Image: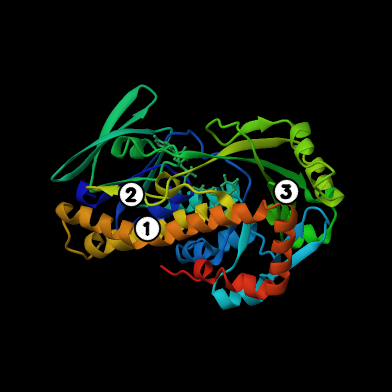
């Protein structure tokens, strides 16, 4: 297939792999450059709400994912101090039927490998592992991308370049060098436990969100319910890049000390054998996502705090909209030429910007609410109880009901 129908995607994370499938479905040839030799499991669990699962099902991943995901029956908001439920937001079959797509929790490696299997099987996608995007140059015919495998440097011609290379994006560094992620002052600790070590039925069936003083804890089943995923968020000034620094168990146990946290929460923290931690960085709201025939997608454009559980969801939505915008003017039966690619990419950014900024605000606001202390925390719990789980869930409707 000629360069005029080729799109290069830098980065084979959740966003890049989804984008390559969505673009290939619109008739493009896609080259995906991934710097790592193997797609590794970064992090552990991931929540996929209906706005994201709907896109993945539309791309043919439904059966593969359903085998590995868990559909939680509820999100239960817990009080760290009392150890009791504050409110229960019902998910399960009724909510999935209403949304027209499931709410899933899944091991990140399961999602990544399902996407990779689909990508590898697709005749129009060329996934190049161990191949690092380095730089690009544009001219009237499109883009020339420079990439490197070990010592060997090569060039590739394409219609467009999509930077799906994560929050420390090299593509963004070349396009907009002054736009940088900012450290939030918070870090995430992640660990998993064999579900048999925490034999409580409620942990296998749903998501628990524990709100405590200046910290919170999210717990849910992954790997078909065989393991429990824990994410603990605390304030800290440690802020190294990367997803996989080891964390000392005694340090996180001390942070969840008896004074503020019920024994049932501390028991779960104590059951984790090994912890990984990563500093939470976020991109400023409303940055620029596109220039000429190049566009950013996912964390590269809008890496956000994980407190709305929507970072991957927004990357997946981006992928669907990007493919739609490029497909409408340059897809299998469209007449667009290289000169009109920038306008298609502008349409993509335009279509995404306001919604993503709203989700970024929601994530920040959730973080503040979860970490309240003293009387403010009490008032929050009473307000949540008064509102009730159904209505709290309905408030997420604008996030979950999104359709491409
Ligand atoms: C604690 C925590 C919990 C989270 N929980 C959720 C959740 O429940 N639900 C949710 O939706 N989101 C969640 N997220 C957010 C989600 O993980 C990210 O938003 C998502 O992974 C972003 O995907 P991406 O494809 O944009 O970037 P990434 O997943 O970072 O992928 C980028 C890829 O690009 C590659 N790359 C980088 N540079 C180059 C280069 N120069 N050349 C080639 N390849 C390159 C990298 O190796 C990587 O494979 C969470 C995040 C955190 C920190």
* Nearest to the observer: residue 7 or residue 332: 7
Residue 289, labelled with which disc?
2
* Nearest to the observer: residue 105 or residue 390: 390
The residue indicated by pointer 3 is 213
Instruction: State whether residue 277 is above or below residue 349.
Output: above
Q: CB of mark 1 within 8 Å of CB of mark 3?
A: no
Q: Is mark 1 within 8 Å of ligand 1?
A: no
Instruction: State whether residue 80 is above or below residue 300.
Output: below
Q: Position of residue 334 (x, y in %)?
A: 21, 64
C-alpha gap between disc 2 and disc 3: 36 Å
Residue 353, labelled with which disc?
1
Q: Is mark 3 within 8 Å of ligand 1?
A: no
Q: Residue at x 34, y 59 (%)?
A: 323
Q: Residue at x 54, y 52 (%)?
A: 364
Secondary structure beneath dot 3 equals loop
Residue located farthest toward the top when viewing the structure as drawn: 151
Callout 1: 10 Å neighbours few (<14), some, many (20+)? some
Q: CB of mark 1 within 8 Å of CB of mark 2?
A: yes
Of the numbered discs 1 and 2, the one sitting upstream in the chain is 2
Dividing the picture into quadrants, the one containing residue 383 is bottom right
Callout 2: 10 Å neighbours few (<14), some, many (20+)? many
Name the quarter where the C terminus is drawn: bottom left
């Amino acid at each position: 297939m000629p360069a005029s129908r080729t799109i290069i995607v830098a980065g084979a994370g959740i966003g890049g792999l989804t984008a390559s499938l969505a673009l290939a479905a619109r008739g493009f040839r896609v080259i995906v450059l991934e710097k790592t030799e193997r797609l590794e499991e970064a992090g552990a669990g991931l929540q996929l709400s209906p706005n994201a699962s709907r896109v993945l099902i539309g791309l043919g991943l439904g059966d593969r994912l359903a085998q590995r995901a868990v559909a939680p029956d509820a999100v239960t908001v817990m009080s760290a101090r009392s150890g009791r439920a504050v409110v229960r937001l019902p998910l399960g079959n009724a909510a999935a039927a209403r949304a027209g797509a499931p709410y899933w929790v899944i091991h990140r490696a399961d999602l990544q490998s399902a996407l990779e299997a689909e990508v590898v099987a697709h005749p129009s996608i060329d996934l190049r592992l161990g191949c690092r995007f380095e730089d690009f140059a544009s001219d009237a015919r499109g883009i020339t991308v420079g990439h490197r495998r070990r010592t060997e440097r090569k060039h590739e011609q394409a219609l467009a370049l999509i930077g799906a290379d994560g929050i420390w994006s090299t593509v963004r560094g070349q396009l907009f060098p002054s736009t940088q992620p900012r450290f939030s002052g918070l870090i995430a600790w992640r660990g998993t436990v064999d579900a048999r070590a925490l034999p409580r039925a409620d942990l296998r069936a749903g998501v628990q969100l524990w709100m405590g003083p200046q910290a919170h804890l999210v717990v849910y089943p992954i790997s078909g319910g065989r393991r429990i995923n824990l994410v603990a968020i605390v304030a800290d000034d440690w802020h190294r890049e990367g997803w996989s620094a080891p964390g000392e168990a005694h340090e996180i146990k001390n942070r969840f000390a008896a004074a503020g946290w019920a024994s049932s929460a501390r028991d779960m923290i104590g059951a984790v054998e090994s912890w990984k931690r990563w500093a939470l960085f976020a991109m400023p709201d409303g940055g620029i996502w596109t220039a000429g025939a190049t566009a950013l997608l996912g964390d590269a454009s809008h890496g956000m705090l994980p407190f709305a559980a929507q970072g991957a969801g927004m990357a997946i939505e981006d992928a669907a909209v990007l493919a739609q915008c490029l497909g409408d003017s340059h897809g299998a039966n469209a007449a667009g030429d290289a000169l009109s690619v920038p306008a298609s990419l502008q349409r993509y950014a335009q279509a995404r910007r306001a919604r993503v900024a709203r989700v970024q605000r929601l994530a920040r606001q959730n973080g503040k609410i979860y970490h309240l202390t003293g009387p403010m925390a009490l008032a929050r719990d009473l307000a949540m109880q008064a509102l009730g789980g159904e209505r709290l869930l309905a408030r997420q409707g604008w996030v979950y009901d999104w359709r491409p």
